[in-house]
Amino acid sequence: MTANNAFHYYYLFGPVPSRRLGRSLGVDPVPFKTCTFNCIYCQIGATTCLTDERMAWVPVADILAELEHFLEHDGVIDAITVGGSGEPTLHEGLGELMDGIIALRARFYADRPAPRICLLTNGSLLYLPEVSAASAKADSVKITFSAANEKIWRELHRHVSTLTYEKALDGLIAFRAEFAGEIRLEVMVVEGVNADSDTMRAIAALTARIHPDKVELNTVVRPPAEMLARPVAAERMEELALLFDPPAEVIGVYKGPALEMSNAAPREDAILALIARHPSTVEDIAGLLGAEPNVVEAALRSLEANKRAFTSIVEGRVYYMAMV
Ligand code: SF4
C-alpha cells in the first residue's frame, strides 16, 4: 500500500472489504509467512517459518507510525484487523501493539464512531497467559477451530511439533472465561478430512464447551496452498451448519458495494497488495477496487509479464496470486 505522498506502508494492507466489518484495515505484525501452522488450505501460501517462538518480528513502533500516518492522511475505515502474513500472536509485543492501536483510535476517533479492533488468530498460543491477555485487548477475536481431535488437527494444520491439540483446546476454553468481547469461531471444512457428519457433530460439541458468540463454517473458496484441500459443496455446508446449536453461519463471498481506494496508489500496486493476501479473479479485483475489468486485466497482464503475479485455475475460475 502506498499513500498519495509516496509514503510506503509495509505493515498495513487494504482497506479490504469484509462482509461483517465493512472496510477493514489490515495490520500485519509478522513477516510472510511466519506461523505455528502450515494448513493444507492456507490461501497465502506454504509456511516458510514454522515456529512457536514469540519474538519482536517487526518493530511495534514502526507499525504504529504507519497506522498514525494512515489515520492522519488516508482512507475511512470501519475496522482495524490484526492478522495477515501468518500468526499474529507470535509477535511478543502484541499487547503493546494493541495498546498503541487503542490509543491511536481514541485520538483520531474522539468525536465519531470508532473502528472495531479485531484479531485473527489460529488460537494455538492462547493457552499462554501473555498471549491470552494481549488478545483480550481486541473488541473481537476470530479463532480457527476445525478439528475434533489431535489426528485431524495435525492433518489440517501440520503444526509446529511442540503444540498439542489438548493444550490449544484448553487455551480456547480458558480464553472464553476471561474475555468478555466477541469470539467468532471459524470452522474450516475440508472434503475428506472433517466434512463428515460424525466429525462435525464432535466439533459442534466442543464448540459448545468453548461458548463462542458465533460459529462460522467456511470452506476452500480460493486456491489453497495445496490441492490437498478440497472444497465442500454449498448444499452440504448448509446441512453441516445445522449440526450446531444454534446453527452455524455459512460464510459466503462478499457482495457489498465496491470500495473506493483510499489513496491514489498506482493501480498495479493496489492490485498486488490485494492478491498478495487473497487470490482473486479479475471480477473480484474490479469489484473491490471499483475499477473497470479491462483496466484490471491489463494491469494483471503487466504484473504477470514482470513475474510479479501468476494464475491458478480452480473449478474453471482463473485466480491471480502475487509472486513472493
Ligand atoms: S491458514 Fe492461517 S493458521 Fe493456517 S497456515 Fe495459513 S496463516 Fe497459518
Image: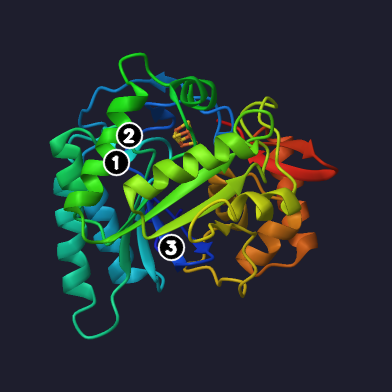
Q: Which residue is mark 2?
A: 169
Which residue is depicted at the point 25% across and 57% down?
A: 138
Q: Which mark is residue 24?
A: 3
Compared to 195, does 213 lie above or below?
A: below
Which residue is depicted at the point 62% across and 63% down?
A: 254
Q: Using the numbered discs, state the Cα–Cα distance from disc 2 to disc 3 in whole angstroms.
A: 28 Å
Which residue is depicted at the point 36% across and 36% down?
A: 87
Q: State the SS at label 3.
A: strand
Q: Position of residue 226 (x, y in %)?
A: 65, 26
- Of residues 147 and 319, which is closer to you in this image? 147
Q: Position of residue 209 (x, y in %)?
A: 34, 46
Q: Residue furthest top?
A: 161
- Of residues 176 and 259, which is closer to you in this image? 176
Which residue is depicted at the point 68% across and 66% down?
A: 287
Q: Amino acid at mark 2?
A: Leu
Q: Amino acid at mark 1?
A: Leu
Q: Using the numbered discs, state the Cα–Cα distance from disc 1 to disc 2 in whole angstroms.
A: 5 Å
Q: Residues within 10 Å of mark 1 (few under 14, many from 20)?
A: many
Left or right: 79, with 278 as reference point: left
Q: State the SS at label 2.
A: helix
Q: Are marks 1 and 2 in contact (CB under 8 Å)?
A: yes
Q: Quadrant of the C terminus?
A: top right
Q: Using the numbered discs, state the Cα–Cα distance from disc 1 to disc 3 in whole angstroms.
A: 25 Å
Q: Which residue is mark 1?
A: 172
Q: Position of residue 181 (x, y in %)?
A: 25, 61
